[in-house]
Structure formats: structure tokens, C-alpha cells
Image (cartoon, rainbow, N blue to C red):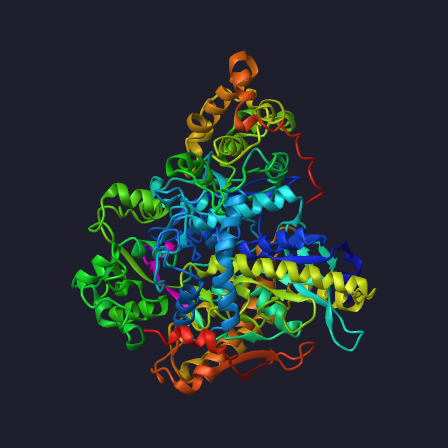
Amino acid sequence: MTEQATSVGYERQAYDVVIVGAGGAGLRAAIAAHDAGARTAIVCKSLLGKAHTVMAEGGIAAAMGNVWPDDGWQVHFRDTMRGGKMLNNWRMAQLHAQESPDRVRELEEWGALFDRTPEGLISQRDFGGHRFARLAHVGDRTGLEMIRTLQQRAVALGIDVFMECTVTRVLLDQSGGEARVAGAFGYWRESGRFIVFDAPAVILATGGIGKSYKVTSNSWEYTGDGHTLALEAGARLLNMEFVQFHPTGMVWPPSVRGILVTESVRGDGGVLRNSEGRRFMFDAIPEFFKSETADSEEEADRWYNDKKANRRPPELLPRDEVARAINSEVKAGRGSPHGGVFLDIASRHDAEYIQRRLPSMYHQFKELADVDITAEPMEVGPTCHYVMGGVEVEPDTAQSGVPGLYAAGEVAGGMHGSNRLGGNSLSDLLVFGRRAGLNAAYYVGRVSRTGSRPQVDPEDVRRAADAALLPFDGVGDENPYAVQHDLQDVMHSLVGIVRRQDEMEEALVQIEKLRERVRRVTVEGHRQYNPGWHLALDLRNMLRVSECIARAALERTESRGGHTRDDYPMTDHDWATVNLVCRLADPSAGEAVEVVRQPLPQMPAELRSLFEEK
Amino acid sequence: MGYDITMRVWRGDAGGGALQDYVVDVEEGEVVLDAVHRLQATQVGDLAVRWNCKAGKCGSCSAEINGRPRLMCMTRLSTFEAGETITVTPLRTFPVIRDLVTDVSYNYEKAKTLPAFAPVPRDADGNYRMAQVDVQRGQEFRKCIECFLCQTVCHVIRDHDDNKPAFSGPRMFLRYAELDMHPLDTNDRRRLAKDAAGLGMCNITKCCTEVCPENIKITDNAIIPLKERVVDRSYDPLVWLGSKIRRRDQRSEPPPTPPPTTR
């Protein structure tokens, strides 16, 4: 092995800031770092413009007040915290609510074409958990607009992009006593050749973990790379037990199971019904949201035009509530023919309105399921969509516990607490992407001024290369696709929407067995564009995050947000102030993930007072 | 529910390759990409294919299916006759890297040559104001998912690598048209569209429009209006004079951006 690794050599590049991932957070970070004067590179697993952000549909939540002038950052902050069942990092939620309007306006300055209000301002739509209509949007393809705008901006600025290049390790300089970032190691997917980046700052913007689940709205890239890179570099992961199942994914035909059906369908008036035709969400309103949720269909329908005198329809409760309710309806035998429930917009609006507001949904159902959503209801069910958990960062700077290592977007934790509101992801990417980029650039400035730029240790490079080549040297007969398939089964059935102690313990046993199998994986062929090899490497990350999720979920003996326990069905006040943190006991050697409890940072009194009114 | 289909998939690399026959077990409701994935998972683990969202939104899984450029994730197996062999080959206009994966860097290089959006100042309250009807034209073009099917089908470059340096292709014309119609933009790119991007080489055969998975009317709504405006500028002295007193032309036309060194 050693001979092979050293004989192949590697390409070497030097930058100030290297950004891993080219979705919304990565691109926004790159623009910020570049604007702050840093030599900046983006490294991404796919082609530029294909990242998962492209699939975001509904919109960007920002309290601009274009439609409802009463909206403001305090209301948005309050909605976000309540949606996350108060487990959010308050400072992140505050910064997010305060800064997202400017981040949206900035996109417009870079060419984005949002839908307009009659006055010509950026239009804003209703979404679950938001008191006012506040999602800036472009039909139901807002993510595409956002990524294209940022992509075109990054290209115009001349930022270097390393496409189809996968980072497998963050390299550290351990010489000064405290480990700090020295660069990153990766491989070109096209050629299989290795590349080493010398960089004092690395920003992780790698997105989520959904590919560890069987039914997911996530693309193949969502293998928990950033989560694992951070853990192995010595950083810590927060809130990993909280996984969001989006209430409405497609359920039929099997090949499209999990593909997202945007929440905008409900924001624009769509309703959920069971096989008996009942709007069952009226039976699933939790105490926590009773005072702000309509209790009759009449009130719910009036709300779309008069938000002051009426309360929100229960279909627009936060996602965790809706997903759980759908799950229960199906279990109770009141589901649709293919194991979902009905989402009906056809009876609520005319065909022209639906096609104008929801063009991609119309197209998606027509092409993939032979369903005309302007004439008949859709069948939908929960799909793994988002991980609230991620790298623990300093709220203002997005820096992790490891100097020089930053995280922004889905890979970062804390912002969304136990459950994310729809629309808050795109704004999160912009707000914290920018903060990560700026602060990484400032950090490199400080490092450069003191004259002690970190050095990559050649021994670390050799070890990283050996680890990457291991699957070619396999002695077993395991197929990486089969192992991934089995992992997805384990996570889906044992650490899914509703969890139990014995099942999660079983999941941990299974994960250990899968890890053994990964060691026996042998890939066919050579290093040039070999998906089997790429998957074999990604599998290690998937197992790592799956273990974190299962361990944290086992530890939290209550139900809250994106973590529902069959054996502890209630929210427990004692857990309201506790974060669970995953770390590696010995990042350089240890395999074991430890889970520790730490107190949730408490918000100052002036913010707390926002929750006392009403 | 499962049944078998016969597939022919091109396998090889820059040095050459050939169609290989496979029998693949598929399920009701599946698309070509599902069949390719099953092939990969069960028979040929190193089969190279590019894909991301599998929902028709990212434009990664473009290929030629029975000779027609399409997204593999949006081509349902039920659209083929029973017993029909499904042949999947890489995009013909771009160099093969491996199997179904091609080198599409041509498109990214062309994108770098286009002068960026340059907006007018904001209104006094910090907002921009645009009417929905005015943004709608550009929004049609911004539906583009950059699958590059229009590029691969375009006969100007499909079998004519020699035209590539002088011709940017329908995807880029869409971008020129979008910026040209953008209510806030101040640049004038008409000369560039004609000279650097090779708009004149397009003879509006509408092949690009036919393959667009987003149903963007590339020829009618983007290319033809752009050609008309370019002609206006080039040949009509009155329009030329008029253009001198309009906002859009207050800036002199910028030179093409030199391509930054990027991989």
C-alpha cells in the first residue's frame, strides 16, 4: 500500500481559504472570502451549479415586510425558536433573522429575478411555522435561482473552482501545541488522482446526511462528508439526534419515492386529507401551538387573506408535527393506496393558478407519476430531508472548535434547534455562508501577519492517500452498493421518524457489522471516474454520521422536534436546556463516538421577553 | 411486478469504447437512470454515470437515449415498446471521460466570457422595483437547469469541433437574452453576442427548443429576439442613434472577461 500511495504522487495547490462544497453556503462563503481579499478556492463533488441547493423549492425566509409590514426580525426570530422547540442557539437564530433581508436584497443585486408584489417589490409567500408570509421566491424553483445567481457571481469574480473533486481529510498542523488547520486532501473524481491544498482556513459547506436513509429527498452527495471531516479533525457535532422528515415526499411510483413535494403547495392553500376525506391535521394540533392554530376549516381558509383576525391552518404547523401526523394516519389504516395521504390543491385553486405558482410540481407529477395536480390530489408521505445537527460553531464567526476550521449551512449545527422551519435553510446558507467566508479570510489575515502559516505534514498526506486507496486493495467480496442499501434499511427502520430504545441499540449493533463489511469492500476497475470507489469512500462517512445520530437519539429520553421516541412520547422540561454533543475520544486513532451533555446557551432577557407576549 | 429489459450502454474512455449489452431487472414506474443504477449496483460496479438529484432539477444526468438527447431521470421506461432495446450513449458533442460521463467544460469556459450583470442603483429606500410582467421574460430563461442538451444537439457544434471556439451555443444565447431583457441591467452585450458568441452562426432550426427538458422556447423567445436586436444595432442608424440616449447604452460595451485560470 505504502509504495502505491507514494508512487502516485499528488497535485499541490495553495490558497488562503478552501471551501468544501458549492451549494448556497459554499458559494456565498467563497464570495465573502474573495471580497475580503483572500485567495479562495471552491472544491465540490459535482459540477458547479448542481449542488443540493438547486432542489430547494419554496423560498428564502426573510422578514422584509414586503407583504405584511408588521413583520420584523423579532417575529421571525420568535417563529424560528418556537419551530425549533426552543433548542436553537439563540444567537444564531437572532443573527439569521436580522441579516436575512439584506442577504436576499444582495441576490437581487447579482441578478436574481424574484417574483414581485403588485408594487414591484420582492413577493413573499406563506410557509409552515411562519406567522407572516415571508418567503422570497421564484415560483417553486427558488433554490435554482439562488444557486445560479451565486454561481454566476462567483464566476464573474473569477473564483477558482475545483469541480468533481472530493475532499477526504482536513489536514492539521499539530506543531504548535494546539492543532490548527493546514489544508485539505482529496481526489479528482475524473482521474482518481490526489490533490493537496495548503490553506490555513477550510470552510465546510457540505450539506447533510440524507443518503443514509432509504426514503430521502436528498441527492447522492448527501453522505455526511463535512460532519465526518469535522469530527476527524477534532471538532464536535451538536444536536445529531434531530433529523427532519419532510412531511410531503412523493410515494408512488417506487422509483420516485422520497422526491420532495414543496411545502408551498400547503402555503398556497393545499390541504391534507386521509382516505376518509378528513383534514386530519385538525386532530393533530399540539398544545404548544393551539393558541396560534385555527380549529375550524372556515377559520383556516379565511387566514390566507386575513392573518390578523384568523389563525394559521394546521397544515402549516412546523414540519415535525405534520410528518408525525401523516405517519400516524397511515399507521391507523387511513392512508392513501400507496401508503401516504392525500395532498389536495386541485379542489382549492384553478388550473392556471396552480401551474403559475407550482410549475415544477405540476411538471414533476405529470412526468413521473402520471398525475395531473390541477385535477386530482397527490399522494404524499414523509421523506428524510434535513439534519438539524451539525458542527458546533461560534455563532458570530462560524468557526468550529478547531482553529481555521469553519462550517456553514446544513453541515453546521445549532441554528435550527430540534426542527427547522421551511424557508429558513436558504436564508441560513446566505447569512452564515457570508459570515464563515469573512471570518475565515480575517483569520488567515491574522495568521499571515504573525508569520506562522501552518504546514502540511507529509506523513498525514501519505496516510490519507493510503486510506483512500484501501478499497482497491480489498480482500473481501463486499459490494459497496449492497452495504449502502443495507445501511439505508437500518436507519430507515431503526432510527427513523419514531424511535425506540431497543431498536436504536440494535441499529448500533448493525452499524458495527456494516463497518466490518466496509473493511471487506473491494471495488472493481481503476481510479478513473469510478463510482464504486467513490461510494466505498463515502460509506465510511455515512456510517460515522449514522452512529452519531443513533447514539445521540438513544441518549435523549424525550420527544422534541425531529426526534420522536415511542418510549418517551412527551417533551421533557429537563431536556429543554441540554444539548448533546458528539466527539471522537481520540480523533487521530479512535473509532468510538462519545456523546456528552452540555447546557444550552441561555438567551438574554430582552430576547426572552419576545416569548412572553401572547 | 419486476420485468427484464435489454440495454445497450456505451462503455469506454477517451481512447475508445463500444456498446455493451445487458439485461436489467426493473420495476414498474422506473426511469432509465434507475435501470443504469441497478446495472451499476448489481453487474458493473465501476460504470461511470453523472447524476445528482434524480428529480429533473439539476440537469446532471444528460445522455443520448436511442439517439435522442435526454435526461435519464426523466425518461420513463414505460415510454419504450415492450421488448425494445434501450441504448444509452454519452453526449456526442463533448469529449468522453469515461462511459456515460463527458467533459462538459466547454460550457463552463463559455460562461466565463460573458460580462456580468451590472445593475442600476437601488431606489432611495434600498429596494429595487420591477413589475412581474417584466421579470417573467427573464424568469423563463432562468428555468434553465444547465443540462446542456441544447448544446449537444446544436448542429453548429455537434459534429464540428472546429466551430466551438467561435460559438457559445444556445445555453449561452439564453443567458445573453436573459441579461438583455433584465429590467435592471445596464450592460449592452449585443456586439459580443454577435461577434464573440457567434450568434450569427445559428440558423434557427429549433433543435435546441425541442430537447429542452424545461420547455424553454429557446429559439422563439431568446435567440430570435436577440438576433433582431443585434441586427437593429448593426444596421439601423435610427435605432443606433436612439440607443445612444437610452439608459442601457450609457455604458460603453465592456470587453469580454478574460477567462480566469480555473479548472
Is residue A221 at least partly visible in the picture?
no
**Residue A250 among magenta residues:** yes
Can you tell which quarter of the image residue A286 is in?
Answer: bottom left
Left or right of B158 on screen, residue A182: right
Is residue B89 at least partly visible in the picture?
yes
**Residue A487 among magenta residues:** no
Q: Quadrant of the N terminus of chain B?
A: bottom left
| Residue in the image at 39% along x and 56% along y | A134
**Residue A406 appears at what percent x and percent y?**
63, 65
**Residue A177 appears at what percent x and percent y?**
78, 78
Q: Is residue B172 above or below residue B260?
A: above
**Residue A402 appears at what percent x and percent y?**
67, 72
| Residue in the image at 42% along x and 70% along y | A419
Q: Quadrant of the C terminus of chain B?
A: top right
| Residue in the image at 34% along x and 51% along y | B29
Magenta region: A244-256
Can you tell which quarter of the image residue A228 is in?
Answer: bottom right
Can you tell which quarter of the image residue B97 is in?
Answer: top right
